[in-house]
């Protein structure tokens, strides 16, 4: 079996939100319903966070979200509010 090239998209759908994020190819969220990671206001984040809790690329996912200013959804097991706090903490530590 050939080794997947992590520099190309593992997704075949044109315009896929995650197509350019190579680490997603091995993420625990692969194949999961994307709506779970982008719940409507008031819906639980826990199902997505449980999946993230078992993920081998959780740190890479979180770092991607922080570096790219992902404002919506669950990334690396964190909510929007948690990522805002992390960004603020990093800015303060860097100052």
Image: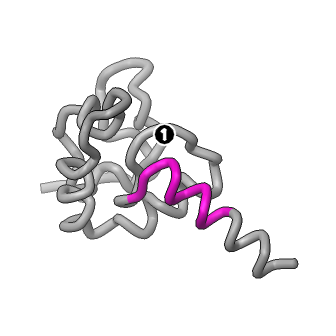
Q: Quadrant of residue 55?
A: bottom left
Residue receiving disc 1: 20
Q: Residue furthest top?
A: 14
Magenta range:
78-87
Q: Nearer the viewer, residue 50 or 17?
A: 50
Q: Is residue 69 above or below residue 63?
A: above
The residue positioned 29% from the left and 50% from the top of the image is: 25
The residue positioned 42% from the left and 35% from the top of the image is: 19
Q: Nearer the viewer, residue 93 or 52?
A: 93
Q: Nearer the viewer, residue 67 or 44?
A: 44
SS for callout 1? loop
- Residue 94 location in percent, x, y? 81, 78
* Residue 34 belongs to the span the image colors magenta: no
Q: Main secondary structure of the magenta part?
A: helix
Q: Quadrant of residue 37?
A: top left
**Colour pattern:** one colour
């Amino acid at each position: 079996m050939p080794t997947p090239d992590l520099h190309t998209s593992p997704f075949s759908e044109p315009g896929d939100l995650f197509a350019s994020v190579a680490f997603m190819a091995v993420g625990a969220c692969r194949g999961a319903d994307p709506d779970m990671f982008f719940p409507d206001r008031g819906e639980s984040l826990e199902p997505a966070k449980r999946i993230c809790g078992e993920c081998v690329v959780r740190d890479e996912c979180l770092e991607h979200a922080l570096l790219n200013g992902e404002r919506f959804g669950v990334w690396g097991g964190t909510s929007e509010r948690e990522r805002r706090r992390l960004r603020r903490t990093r800015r303060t530590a860097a100052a």
